[in-house]
Amino acid sequence: MRLIGRRLRVDPVQADTALAVVLMVVTIVYGLQSYQARYRAEGWRPFDVAAAGLCVLAALPLAVRRRHPWTVLVLSVTGLLVYTGAGFQPSVNVWPPLLAGYTVIARRPPREAVAAGTLTGGAWIASGLEARLSVELAVAQSVIALGIVGIFATGTRRLAERNAQLAEATDRLRREQELRARHAVVEERVRIARELHDVIAHHLSALAVQAGVAEYVFASDPPAARAALAAIGATSREALEEMRGLLQVLRVSGEVPCDQERLYRAAPGLAQLGELVERTRAAGVPIRVVVAGPARMLAPGVDLCAFRVVQEALTNVIKHAGRPATATVDLCYRPDRLEGRITDDGPGNGRAVPGSGLGLIGIRERVRLYGGSVHTGPRPDGGFEVAFTLPVTSTDP
């Protein structure tokens, strides 16, 4: 169907050229035949070469009527007026000026359209008077012809204006869609950057502490050093696996095969809280976990958000709480929300790993994204506290 449509479409210039040639030929043939059949006997001037030349002047410029509408109109009207003024038979060369006037009315502003209608109507009236019609009849036929042309031309101009507005709106919509797509890409990059920050910050903090412990007890307590090195290996492998799963999201496309099950496992949740606690304990921080209320499945986004908040809070305990320090993770499942509180009682002088302050900012951004609230700050009796609340939907325990 597309091939047929392309074959049926004709170039406007070619169509106008064909129309001009056909109209010119028809006008000349009609002038010759009507002169021989009627006007010769009535004493009109013979239809000669000059008459044919004026027919060419009136009709042939229509080939470029879209590019030069006013020039074509002036030439067609001039051809008609000279033809009738020279005493040639009537009813010839009246249609090219009408078509040229239609073009100006349809393609030019309203003020120019009025001028074009006046010029065309005046030419028609003059032709009618030269054809020995009464003034009333000459004016009437001019008004009727121009009225019909004006209706069609005005409709054509309004349709063209609506098409232009539609094209502009379509282009604006396309640009807005591109901007939204670009914005979505930026948001996705920010999300992935946040995920990478959480993964790298937590695991590297644990690795740094465990490496320090292994170095400190390497000679005095070989079993503890070996345990620390084993924890380093396990933590490194877990970090690599989680980062690999996260970065695999960037490579998903229709041409690259992907393990979908593994991809969906790349986003952790509170189900992995036990592994997170054990890893933090291996870094030398005792942790107590308290869960109140019936634990239940959460929406993936909320589940990931809660896990990342706990992970970042425990990372800060490893990095900044100092020694000795213990941490407590309190989770309370309520019908409409999840409440979490991570505290430590450390002196706050631990600076084993320098921090950038982006972790707490990331916590606030995550919690606010899901309509929750968060509070972070020192505790009155020492230590640090991260408390958050996330709205959840009611589901079965």
Image: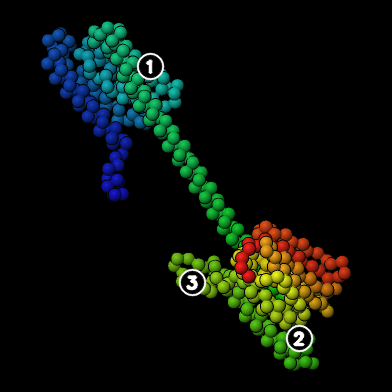
Report the label total.
Answer: 3
Q: Earlier in the sequence, mark 3 or mark 1?
A: 1
> Mark 3 against mark 1, which lies toward the viewer?
3
Q: Nearer the viewer, residue 7 or 57?
A: 7
Query: Does 247 appear above or below 280?
Result: above
Residue 256, given in percent of the width and then of the height, sits at 46, 69
- Is residue 1 visible in the rendered image? The answer is yes
Cα–Cα span, label 1 and label 2: 101 Å
Amino acid type, callout 1: Thr
Q: Earlier in the sequence, mark 1 or mark 2?
A: 1
Answer few, some or many: residues within 10 Å of disc 2's Cα (few below 14, many 20 plus, some between 14 and 19).
Answer: some
Q: Is residue 272 left or right of residue 128?
A: right
Asked if disc 3 and disc 1 are in contact, CB closer than 8 Å, the reply is: no
Q: Which residue is mark 2?
A: 215
> Mark 2 against mark 3, which lies toward the viewer?
3
Query: Does 253 appear above or below 215?
Result: above
Element assignment for label 1: helix
Q: Which residue is mark 1?
A: 118
Cα–Cα span, label 3 and label 1: 73 Å
Residue 243, given in percent of the width and then of the height, sits at 60, 73
* Residue beneath the point at 31% across and 25% down: 99
Element assignment for label 3: loop
* Residue beneath the point at 78% across and 64% down: 376
Amino acid type, callout 3: Cys
Residue 67, given in percent of the width and then of the height, sits at 37, 31
* Residue beneath the point at 28% across and 23% down: 96
* Residue beneath the point at 74% across and 74% down: 290
Q: Nearer the viewer, residue 343 or 339?
A: 339
Q: Which residue is mark 3?
A: 258
Element assignment for label 2: helix
The structure's colour scheme is rainbow
Amino acid type, callout 2: Glu
